[in-house]
Image: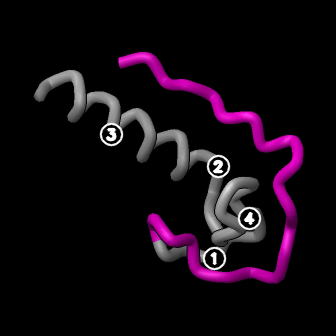
Amino acid sequence: MTHELLDWRHAQVGDPAPCVICRRPALMRDPDTQQPKHKVCAEKALAERRAENEAA
């Protein structure tokens, strides 16, 4: 499985808040949704969704 690296150069930084994926504290905000999220969590979730779509 190839992992796609997301471009988060324009992501905002905020106070720690639970990551919407892993629930651990995250400083970064998703540049598209502004939700607290770790970049690695977002990349892993994207790769998993793509793998599921390819398997279907």
- Which residue is identified by label 2? 39
Which residue is drawn at the image coordinates 32% and 39% (left, top)?
Answer: 49
Q: Nearer the viewer, mark 1 or mark 2?
A: 2
- Which residue is identified by label 3? 49
Counting residues from the N terminus, which is met first, the one under dot 4 or under dot 2?
4
The part of the chain drawn in magenta is: 1-22
The numbered mark at residue 29 is 4
Q: Nearer the viewer, mark 1 or mark 3?
A: 3
C-beta proximity under 8 Å, tags 4 and 3: no
Q: Position of residue 40 (x, y in %)?
A: 58, 46
* In this rendering, position of residue 48 left or right of residue 20: left
Which residue is drawn at the image coordinates 71% and 67% (left, top)?
Answer: 34
Looking at the image, residue 34 lies above or below residue 8? below
- Which residue is identified by label 1? 25
Counting residues from the N terminus, which is met first, the one under dot 1 or under dot 2?
1
Q: Secondary structure at mark 2?
A: helix
Looking at the image, residue 11 lies above or below residue 37? above
C-beta proximity under 8 Å, tags 2 and 3: no
Q: Nearer the viewer, mark 4 or mark 2?
A: 4
Q: In the rendered image, which quarter is residue 18 located in?
A: bottom right
Counting residues from the N terminus, which is met first, the one under dot 2 or under dot 3?
2
Q: Position of residue 55 (x, y in %)?
A: 14, 25
Looking at the image, residue 44 lies above or below residue 51? below
